Amino acid sequence: MAYPGFSSRCLLIYVLSVIFMTALLGGCSPESKESKYEIFPPAGGKGAIVVVASGYTGPGLYRDFSSKLAELGYYAVLMDGKDLFDPGSVGRIVPATQNLQTVIAASKSSPQAIPGKVSLVGFSVGGAGVLSYGTKLKDQVSAVVAYYPAITTMGRNMKTFAAGLQTPVLLFAGVKDRYHNCCLIETMRELARAPKSVPFELVEYPKANHCFNIQSLPFAYRPEDAADSWARTVAFLNRLHPPGGK
């Protein structure tokens, strides 16, 4: 079929350009799939909610941590950290706040969860996600814990970033962490020094690298630092978000 003013070659180029632009614009649309998460209910009764956001590899390495929270009496929910922040995505906008609020709302609907505020714990990209989006939900979030958060890759001004924090924060960092330049100690220290309106604590581990608390990664695991960070996390949550609720 002939089209006035179009040669066969021009028509082909036109059709291909339409297909390309449709794919490009579609790829820049917010992700529509629902956020997936795993539940770790308390052994008995009800528990205060703690949402755990994994690192880039997904939830697998963080099930033990979530299970330990449940053993303390928390209603733990493990989500993929890439649903909050995905530096590896190309042309995909992550609806982070929406994803986080969806998981929080779903958690509150459980008969095993204590309604009210939740706490957030994030690792690497998940740590960057809970810091960036969770700390802004002060009416829903009581405290945030971030393990080696990937904030360096977000291109943020740390003074502006610090000024936007609205919930208490406990941050763990390895001094030797150079993993994809995501979690540099210099950036963590800059964030710690910047003025802020909420309690903030940076804990440094001089010999630690990325994933220092993940036992299944023997090349990175440091038992002493893992035990210390866990004890500090439990104390922080007990003070601001006890498992039995306030």
Image (tube, rainbow, N blue to C red):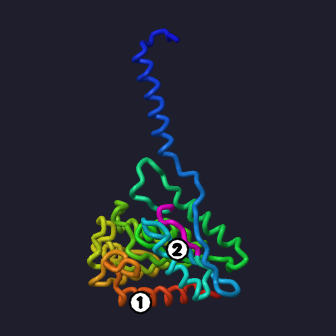
Q: Tag 2 or tag 1, which sits nearer the N-term?
A: 2
| Residue span colored magenta | 77-83
Q: Residue furthest right?
A: 111
Q: CA distance from mark 1 to mark 2?
A: 18 Å
Does 131 appear in magenta? no
Residue 127 against residue 83 in the figure, above or below: below
User: On residue 116, which mark appears?
Assistant: none
Report crowding for label 1: few under 14, some 14 to 19, many 20 or more residues within 10 A (C-alpha).
Answer: few
Please state if 215 lies on the left or on the right of 208 as rendered.
right
In which image quadrant can residue 56 be found? bottom left
Report crowding for label 2: few under 14, some 14 to 19, many 20 or more residues within 10 A (C-alpha).
Answer: many
Frontmost residue, 92 versus 71: 71
Frontmost residue, 169 versus 41: 41
Please state if 52 lies on the left or on the right of 10 as rendered.
right
Residue 179 against residue 34 in the figure, above or below: below
User: On residue 52, which mark appears?
Assistant: 2
Q: Amino acid at mark 2?
A: Val
Please state if 40 lies on the left or on the right of 90 as rendered.
right
Element marked by disc 1: helix
For image coordinates 49% across by 55% down, the residue present is: 94
For image coordinates 46% across by 68% down, the residue present is: 126
Frontmost residue, 230 versus 16: 16
Element marked by disc 2: strand
Frontmost residue, 143 versus 221: 221
Please state if 221 lies on the left or on the right of 63 as rendered.
left
For image coordinates 47% across by 70% down, the residue present is: 54
In which image quadrant can residue 112 be found? bottom right
Which x, y percent locates residue 217?
A: 37, 77
Which x, y percent locates residue 63?
A: 51, 76
Q: Which residue is mark 1?
A: 227
User: Where's the C terminus, which quadrant?
Assistant: bottom right
